[in-house]
Image (cartoon, coloured by chain):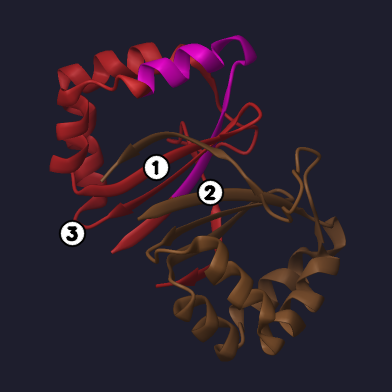
Chain colours: A brown, B red
Amino acid sequence: MMRIGSVIKLKPEAVLAYKQLHAHAWKQVLAKITECNIHNYSIYIYGDTLFSYYEYIGADYAGDMAKMGEDEVTRAWWSICKPLQSPVDEIETGEWWHTIEEVFHLD
Amino acid sequence: MMRIGSVIKLKPEAVLAYKQLHAHAWKQVLAKITECNIHNYSIYIYGDTLFSYYEYIGADYAGDMAKMGEDEVTRAWWSICKPLQSPVDEIETGEWWHTIEEVFHLD
């Protein structure tokens, strides 16, 4: 099982819209996330920074992420979320959310 | 089950020491955390910001936190960790790490 932590910024004027959107997340998007083997997925906000934590329980992370990206409803969801977000300066090629380093874990 | 996300800063010169300390976390501290009903506990670092995520599976969070604070080895651990850390401006009474808002969760 992989645990993945990542960060992204929200545009300051988009905080309320982002929260409302996620309080009413689309069921097809949630189903696709689960189908792609992502579980226990939480997003927290601190100021204008979003932190996400999730667990990947499949055997082909890249393949599952590609599958998610091919889903029409998920792409429509992203087309709404992305304009609200602003990637951090440390973003690497292929990232939108930026993966951060785990320094401690206790099961 | 409660999920808790929180943040704190590290003093810039303390990043390596903090990582090393947590790569060699004391087994009595880990055992006390587990005994106090905290599970699936991760800490991530982004720049000088630490983000923690854990799950509380007990029935008396305040009581369990008080029990942890009475443990001599845990207090010794904290006496080393705290000088490396710098609480965020938003800290509230009784906090060291600052609890942040969950905006999304999917089991």
Which circle's residue, 1 or 3, is located before the other in the chain? 1
Q: Which residue is mark 2?
A: A5
- Which residue: 21% across, 31% down? B30
**How far apart are the two marked residues, 1 and 2, measured between alpha carbons?**
9 Å
What kind of element bears circle 2?
strand
Q: Is residue B17 magenta?
A: yes
Instruction: Name the chief secondary structure element in magenta.
Output: helix
Percent x, y for residue B26? 22, 20
Q: Nearer the viewer, mark 1 or mark 3?
A: 1
Q: Which residue is mark 1?
A: B42
Callout 2: chain: A
Q: Nearer the viewer, mark 3 or mark 2?
A: 2
Callout 3: chain: B
Residue A13 vs residue B91, the one in the foreground: A13
**How far apart are the two marked residues, 3 and 2, measured between alpha carbons?**
27 Å
Report the amino acid beneath label 3.
Answer: Ala
Q: Which residue is mark 3?
A: B59
- Which residue: 80% across, 77% down? A80
Up/down of A63 relative to A25, above or below: above
- Which residue: 61% across, 76% down? A68
Quadrant position of the N terminus of chain A in the picture:
bottom left
Percent x, y for residue B71? 16, 24
